[in-house]
Image (cartoon, rainbow, N blue to C red):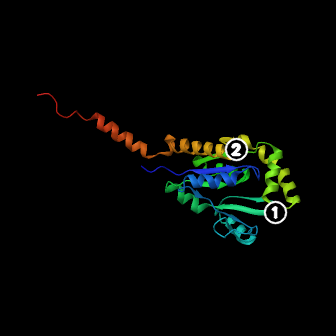
Amino acid sequence: MTRRGLLIILSSPSGAGKSTLARRLRDWDPTIRFSVSATTRAPRPGEVDGREYHFVDKDRFAAMVEQGAMLEHAEVFGNLYGTPAAPVEQALTRGEDTLFDIDWQGGQQIRNSALGQDVVSIFILPPSMAELERRLTARAHDSEAVIAARMGKSLAEISHWAEYDYVLVNRDVDACEQSLRTILTAERLRRGRQPWLNGFVRDLSAEGARPLSGGED
């Protein structure tokens, strides 16, 4: 009675909370596998190759794209990011859910791919642009110039909100997490994602067509 896996796409402007929510969703259900992207950017302090990202050079990244080994890829602030396809396809057939922390460009490519029917896409909005800027500044990862660039890109990213199946406003991270859990629970129960039902209902019909036992003398 194994169901087919899900591709859970979680997108937002940088700083709106998608990475935090992605981690919380996996804490809630550890069976959800996190899609580890390949990137050409340098590791940040504390990041480990193969855990946060597969860190590769531009030549290796280009070769993967040319070989059709990337499910999606995009350039973000001068760095290349992409999702290796093979691990995702294998997880789907095993009935495992894969979580993607990617931007709208990557999400669009996956939705338009051969695996589009397996996608559940969710866009996270910030409560305000002022709060978004505060969160970016509080992370202390980026220079003022990079923060300004991210803020400038945020409106363009937000303009794609209507392309997603679900849209949540992250006013409170606990409430937003609960909404994500509800979405995932419902999507897992969709009829089309439970192929075992065909055989189950066929057996029920066959059972119902058999004569009742212990008939009259």
Identify the mark at residue 172; answer none if there is no mark.
2
Q: Which one is in front in this view, the residue at disc 2 or the one at disc 1?
A: 2
Badge 2, how many Cα within 10 Å: few under 14, some, many 20+? few
Displayed quadrant of residue 203: top left
Q: Is residue 68 left or right of residue 59?
A: left
Res. 160 in view: yes
Identify the mark at residue 78; answer none if there is no mark.
1
Separation of marks 2 and 1 at Cα, in angstroms: 32 Å
From the top left corner, tell me how far across and down residue 110 is, in percent: 65, 52
Which type of secondary structure does the marked residue at label 1 adopt?
A: loop
From the top left corner, tell me how far across and down residue 12 is, in percent: 73, 49
Q: Are marks 2 and 1 in contact (CB under 8 Å)?
A: no
Q: Earlier in the sequence, mark 2 or mark 1?
A: 1
From the top left corner, tell me how far across and down residue 59 is, in percent: 74, 72
Q: How many marks?
A: 2
Residue 118, above or below 53: above
Displayed quadrant of residue 171: top right
Q: Is residue 198 left or right of residue 64?
A: left
Residue 61, above or below 127: below
Q: Name the kind of residue labelled 1 in the image.
A: Gly
Res. 114 in view: no
Query: In the rendered view of the protein, which quadrant contains the C terminus?
Result: top left
Residue at 56% across / 52% down in the picture?
A: 28
Residue at 69% across / 61% down in the picture?
A: 82
Who is closer to the viewer here, 187 or 92?
187
Who is closer to the viewer here, 84 or 21?
21
